[in-house]
Amino acid sequence: MPAPQPSHYYIYYPIRLGQEGDLARVLDLIQADLARGLGIRGRYLRKADDPWTWMEIYENVPDPTAFETALASALEAHGFARFLEEGRHRHVERFIPCV
C-alpha cells in the first residue's frame, strides 16, 4: 500500500484594514507554534490588488488531522478571530498531488 500523499493548505480570508501590523505579528506567532510543534513551516501573503485579502500557505503536511487540530488551537490561543472582517471567515482549501 503506498504511503499517504502530503497535503498542501491554502487558507484565505478578508481582514479588518488598519490591523495589518498586528496581524503579521500574530501570524508569525501562530506559524512559530506550528513549526515548533509539528515541524510545519508556513508563510503568508497579501493579495496584490486587494490589500484586505490575506492567505496562509502550509505545504507538505503529512498528517492533516494533527495539523488542523494544532492550527485551530494556535488560532484560538492568539485570538486570531479579531482580525477577520465582521461576519466573514477563513476559507481552507486542501490539495494533494495528482499522482
Image (cartoon, helix red, strand yellow):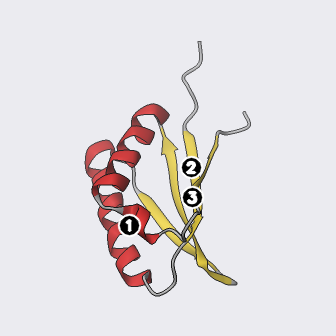
Query: How far is disc 2 from disc 1 in space, using C-alphas?
Result: 15 Å
Q: Amino acid at mark 3?
A: His
- First-in-chain label (2 vs 1): 2
Residue 59: image x %, image y %? 52, 50
Q: Amino acid at mark 1?
A: Leu
Dot 3 crowding, Cα within 10 Å, few <14, some 14–19, many 20+: few
Identified at 33% across, 62% down, the residue is 79
Label 2 SS = strand
What residue is pinned by disc 2? 9
Tell me where residue 95 sits by quadrant.
Answer: top right
Q: Amino acid at mark 2?
A: Tyr
Q: Which disc number belongs to residue 27?
A: 1
Query: How far is disc 3 from disc 1 in space, using C-alphas?
Result: 16 Å
Please say if 81 is above or below 94. Answer: below
Please say if 21 is above or below 69. Answer: below
Q: Nearer the viewer, residue 83 or 10?
A: 83
For the C terminus, which image quadrant?
top right
Q: Nearer the viewer, residue 53 or 61?
A: 53
Residue at the right extreme, as displayed = 98
What residue is pinned by disc 3? 89
Tell me where residue 55 sits by quadrant.
Answer: bottom right
Residue 70: image x %, image y %? 35, 43
Identified at 33% across, 74% down, the residue is 25
- First-in-chain label (3 vs 1): 1
For the N terminus, which image quadrant?
top right
Q: Nearer the viewer, mark 2 or mark 3?
A: 3
Label 3 SS = loop
